[in-house]
Image (cartoon, grey):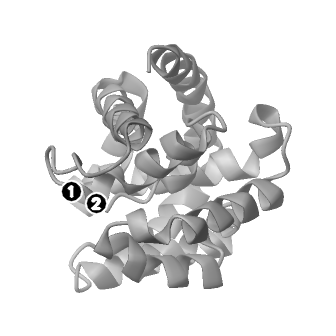
Amino acid sequence: MIMNFLAHIFLSFNDDEIALGNFIADSIRANKFQHLPPRIIQGITLHRAIDTFTDSHKIPKISSKRLHKNYSHYSRVIVDIYYDHFLAKNWLRYSDVPLDIFVSDFYTLLEKNYDLLPAQVKRMMPYMIHDNWLLNYGNLEGIAKVLEGMNRRTKNKSKMNLAIIDLEKHYDLFEEEFTLFFDELLAYAQARFKTL
């Protein structure tokens, strides 16, 4: 499961069902979502469109290339995590709602819709809420914990726990790339959202 949760939730533009779909999309295989409400399905579709846009965009590729020597194919996942950090850090540039309130409201949304969540998300959710992942994306300690957790999930093969060093070393450069990219992603996601 890719860890750029905050961006996907934010790019649901305060639509609860779209946010649920956008959040659970990585846990849904292919088109095995016909049992879900239509608006949640649209959120899954939006998530996949955002991923396609991101994967084909030159700026995240530049960020990823800087990490590729040390982390190989995991570099794209690491960039997702970095970019969520910069979104959280610069949150008030993009949202009028303070991050702690936005995050708390989203956790409440998950709890209210627990029965709709895939098993994988149900298993993850208590840890996510207890450790307040989304809010803690905004600080380096929180990002370090995410990277450590991802490394454990790869049985220490990815060495992603070391990527906090790369983030600190090239911090301003990654932040500049995020800012340029996210402005474009935001415009793209808004346009797609209007078609749902």
Residue picked out by circle 1: 72
Q: Is residue 183 visible?
A: yes
* Residue depicted at x 51% and y 13%: 191
Residue 75, compared with residue 149, is above or below; it is: above
Residue 12, compared with residue 9, is above or below; it is: above
In three-dimensional space, the C-alpha distance between marks 2 and 1, rounded to whole angstroms, equals 23 Å
Residue picked out by circle 2: 27
Q: Position of residue 183 (x, y in %)?
A: 61, 22
Residue 38, compared with residue 160, is above or below; it is: above
Q: Position of residue 76 (x, y in %)?
A: 32, 49
As helix, strand or loop, the secondary structure at mark 2 comes to helix
Asked whether 132 or 67 is in front, the reply is: 132
Question: Can you say which quadrant of the picture contains the C terminus?
Answer: top left
Q: Position of residue 13 (x, y in %)?
A: 63, 33
**From the viewer's perspective, is 93 left or right of 73?**
right
Q: Position of residue 160 (x, y in %)?
A: 36, 71
Label 2 crowd bin: few (<14), some (14–19), many (20+), radius 10 Å: some
Name the amino acid type tagged 1: Ser
* Residue depicted at x 37% and y 74%: 150
Residue 62 figure quarter: top left
Name the amino acid type tagged 2: Ser
**From the viewer's perspective, is 20 left or right of 36?**
right
Q: Nearer the viewer, mark 2 or mark 1?
A: 2
